[in-house]
Image (spheres, rainbow, N blue to C red):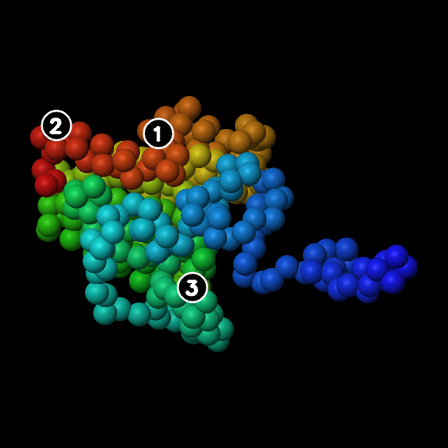
Amino acid sequence: MIMIVDKMKKREPTAKRIDNKVDIQIGKWVKCDKCKEILYKETVRNNYSICPNCGAYFRMHINKRIESIIDEGTYKRFDFNIDTTNPLDLEDYPKKIKSLREKTGIQEAVGCGTGKINQEEVVICVMDSGFLMGSMGVVVGEKITYSVEKAIELNLPLIIFTVSGGARMQEGIISLMQMAKTTSAIAKLNKAGGLYISVLTDPTYGGVTASFASLADIILAEPGAMIGFAGQRVIEQTIGQTLPEGFQTAEFLLEHGFIDKIVERKKLKDTLYQLIQFHKIKGGSSK
């Protein structure tokens, strides 16, 4: 009996503990910021990047978002012959861009192309928070503008999923010019009678909110998404007033008319399809 106990004591633990924390394999697990549960990444991915424990939303990679919205095998990415420049000649900026491309597997903070939603063809743009927090620089502005123009040319509905911290300050005033550029393109789409649906995800801030994200015919948002121009502290300091609790949440903005509907991630594809169908019935010009 003593020998058995000794053998049990000598067994190595299956997970090493460092500073009272379990040393878990890097890359296999993720922590939910809301419920603090440690979750297996693959389980989260298979659940639309939603925490199976508390229902909190994780941010989605471009590829995963397209997979959840666009019919399999129908997505065709626009072939852009443009690259990110360094107008302020910042030493670390090109290195950062190169590092992010290797890490995320994408070229810039937005991916654009055509695809089908339940056999309805659309032009779709998806922003990714993993690439400089979805900030809008020259390339992002050009890709969005090009996509809007293609929606007009092809007579297709336009859908843009936003997630952004705003304009990309590493590109200075040129990044701010993208607000006017994208806004002008959306105005042309509106004049042509095309359907534009904006889907705001967490977070959507700054120059993106102040331009194309807020100019859609229909504005949807995911539950709990934070949406605004500047942060609460900055606004309070500027206007000298205390702001309501949660005033930048999708739920508050729905109540006050800024967005049209909050849609759960699992229902987004069907909701978008229904809106496209409704637009066709009402005599919209999109196919």
Give the residue number, with chain letter if any, for mark 2. Answer: 282
Badge 2: residue crowd in 10 Å (few <14, some 14–19, many ≥20): few
Q: Position of residue 252 (x, y in %)?
A: 46, 28
Q: Position of residue 123 (x, y in %)?
A: 20, 49
Q: Position of residue 245 (x, y in %)?
A: 56, 29
Position of 87 relative to 218 (above/below):
below
Residue at the image position 90 percent from the left and 59 percent from the top: 2
Please name the amino acid that badge 1 sits on: Lys
Please name the amino acid that badge 3 sits on: Thr
Report the Cα–Cα distance between label 1 and label 2.
19 Å
- Nearer to me, 225 or 274: 274
Q: Quadrant of residue 62?
A: bottom left
174 with respect to 154 (left or right): right
Q: Quadrant of the C terminus?
A: top left
Q: Is disc 2 placed on a helix, strand or loop?
A: loop
Disc number for residue 261: 1
Q: Is disc 1 placed on a helix, strand or loop?
A: strand
Give the residue number, with chain letter if any, for mark 3. Answer: 104
Q: Are marks 1 and 3 in contact (CB under 8 Å)?
A: no
Residue at the image position 64 percent from the left and 59 percent from the top: 24
Q: Position of residue 82 (x, y in %)?
A: 26, 69
185 with respect to 229 (left or right): left
Please name the amino acid that badge 2 sits on: Lys
Residue furthest front as drawn: 1
254 with respect to 20 (left or right): left
Q: Is disc 3 placed on a helix, strand or loop?
A: helix
